[in-house]
Each structure stands twice: as structure tokens, then as C-alpha cells.
């Protein structure tokens, strides 16, 4: 079936470090892929998205590339800030129905 | 204000009681969803709706009831609350069926069943 797997957290980094959060998916057809971010006490908000193979989504210094050959959508940022501390969710929206499938989330802590 | 709002933000209820969580969106989005968020499980889909009067079960629908008589509202009812339903509940909406459109989330309702 369709699923999203992302790396377990929490991930703790120092400010200005390089960030990678791995995400892989299984799906039939050609889903759209998303990264959402959840700041403490808030709902999820879209961080970036990619809708077809080789698309790169980017926002606020974060990037992720839709890799169909490896079924991956890894999130990267070159230099993280304390304000990036949050929970990050990888998700897919599948074509055959209207559901959005989320990964379990990765909690990120950035130390000053 | 425009957007998607949930009420209440916090709720404590007793086991066996019926409780309804409200969700209202001002965009006239077609699709609406209810998720619950629990440690170790991420977000799990409870119910979703493609339009008014059309609803379908998600991954964990047992113990929940939904209705959608108007496009803008999608209430979630726990018919007889249990402790296992203690969670944070999120409502979301999506404008169209196109898979490249993202979901917009409410602020969440933290429900505690004692």
C-alpha cells in the first residue's frame, strides 16, 4: 500500500550545521510530495512541495528533490537556525483517491 | 477572519460522554479531513469528506462520527469518549482534487478524556 517513512527523531544539531531528514515513500501512480512543518502549539503548515519526478521544492532555505528512481524526497538545509526547531512531516497525496498520507514526523532541535 | 478554525482549542471530558469538535473553513474548499496526532504515530486520518454530504472513513474511524451538511463545516463527534481517544485533533482542508494542491490545517484541539 501507500506509505511514507521518515527518519526517527529527535535530531539535534548546532546552529549553522547542515541538515538532512530522510523520507522515502511507496505509492502507486505519481503522487505529489510535501514537507510540512509544525511549530510548538501550532498546526501544520506547508514548507515545500514537488509534483513530479525531478522537481525541486524550496522555501526558507530548505530544499527537497522528488527522486522517483529511489522513491525519496529528502529534506535539506545548508545552515540551520534555532528558529528551525520544529517537527517536520513528509507526506504524499495520492492520485487514486483524495487522501494525504503522512510520515510519523521528525522532531528537530537546534542548539545555539 | 479567513482560514480554518477549530473549536474548542482545549477540552477535558469524562469517559462515556459525547463530545463534538468543530471545524470551520472560509475558503469553500471541497475537501476536508480530520486527523489525530499521537506520539509515535504521527498523523492518522480519521475521516475525510470530498464535498458536502460525502464522507469516507480513514485509517482510524472507530468511535468517531462525522457529518458535512455545509461545505464550510466538518464537525467530528466522539459518541462515547474513551481514554484512548485522548489526543490532539487536527482539521484540514484542500481546495481541489488536483494532487499538487496542499492542505491547510487548523490550530488543533487538545482533547483529554479522564
Image: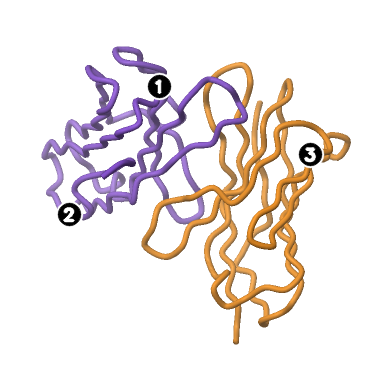
Chain colours: A orange, B purple
Q: Is residue A62 above or below residue A101?
A: below
Residue that appears at 65% across and 55% down? A59
Extreme-bottom residue of the structure: A112
Q: Name the residue that disc number 1 marks.
A: B30
- Looking at the picture, how far across and down is residue A2, in whole percent? 65, 29
Instruction: Classify 10 Å Cα crowding around label 1: few (below 14), some (14-19), many (20 and above).
Output: some
Chain name for mark 2: B
Residue that appears at 44% across and 34% down? B45
Residue that appears at 67% across and 77% down? A13
Q: Name the residue that disc number 3 marks.
A: A55
* Marks 1/3 same chain: no
Residue B16, image quadrant: top left
Q: CA distance from mark 2 to mark 3?
A: 47 Å
Chain name for mark 3: A
Q: Is residue A88 above or below residue B35?
A: below
Q: Which mark is residue B114?
A: 2
Name the front one of labels 1 and 2: 1
Name the front one of labels 2 and 3: 3
- Looking at the picture, how far across and down is residue A112, in whole percent? 60, 87
Residue A51 in the figure: left or right of residue B9: right
Residue that appears at 46% across and 50% down? A44
Under circle 1, the secondary element is loop
Instruction: Classify 10 Å Cα crowding around label 2: few (below 14), some (14-19), many (20 and above).
Output: few
Q: CA distance from mark 1 to mark 2?
A: 35 Å
Under circle 2, the secondary element is loop
Residue in front for this viewpoint, A99 or B97 = B97
Q: CA distance from mark 1 to mark 3?
A: 26 Å
Amino acid at each position: 500500500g501507500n506509505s511514507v517513512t521518515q527518519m526517527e527523531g529527535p535530531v539535534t544539531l548546532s546552529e549553522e550545521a547542515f541538515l538532512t531528514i530522510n523520507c522515502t515513500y511507496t505509492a502507486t501512480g505519481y503522487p505529489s510530495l510535501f514537507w510540512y512543518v509544525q511549530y510548538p502549539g501550532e498546526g501544520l503548515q506547508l514548507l515545500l512541495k514537488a509534483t513530479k519526478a525531478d522537481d525541486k521544492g524550496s522555501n526558507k532555505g530548505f530544499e527537497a528533490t522528488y527522486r522517483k528512481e529511489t522513491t525519496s524526497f529528502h529534506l535539506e538545509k545548508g545552515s540551520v537556525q534555532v528558529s528551525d526547531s520544529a517537527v517536520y512531516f513528509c507526506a504524499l497525496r495520492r492520485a487514486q483517491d483524495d487522501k494525504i498520507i503522512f510520515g510519523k514526523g521528525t522532531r528537530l532541535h537546534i542548539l545555539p | 477572519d479567513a482560514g480554518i478554525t477549530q473549536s474548542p482549542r482545549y477540552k477535558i471530558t469524562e469517559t462515556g460522554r459525547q463530545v463534538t469538535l468543530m471545524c470551520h473553513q472560509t475558503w469553500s474548499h471541497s475537501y476536508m479531513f480530520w486527523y489525530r496526532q499521537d506520539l509515535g504515530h504521527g498523523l492518522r486520518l480519521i475521516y475525510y469528506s470530498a464535498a458536502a454530504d460525502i464522507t469516507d472513513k480513514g485509517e482510524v474511524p472507530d468511535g468517531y462520527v462525522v457529518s458535512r451538511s455545509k461545505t464550510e463545516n466538518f464537525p467530528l463527534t466522539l459518541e462515547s469518549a474513551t481514554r484512548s481517544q485522548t489526543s490532539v485533533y487536527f482539521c484540514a482542508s484542500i481546495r481541489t482534487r488536483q494532487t499538487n494542491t496542499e492542505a491547510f490545517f487548523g490550530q488543533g484541539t487538545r482533547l483529554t478524556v479522564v
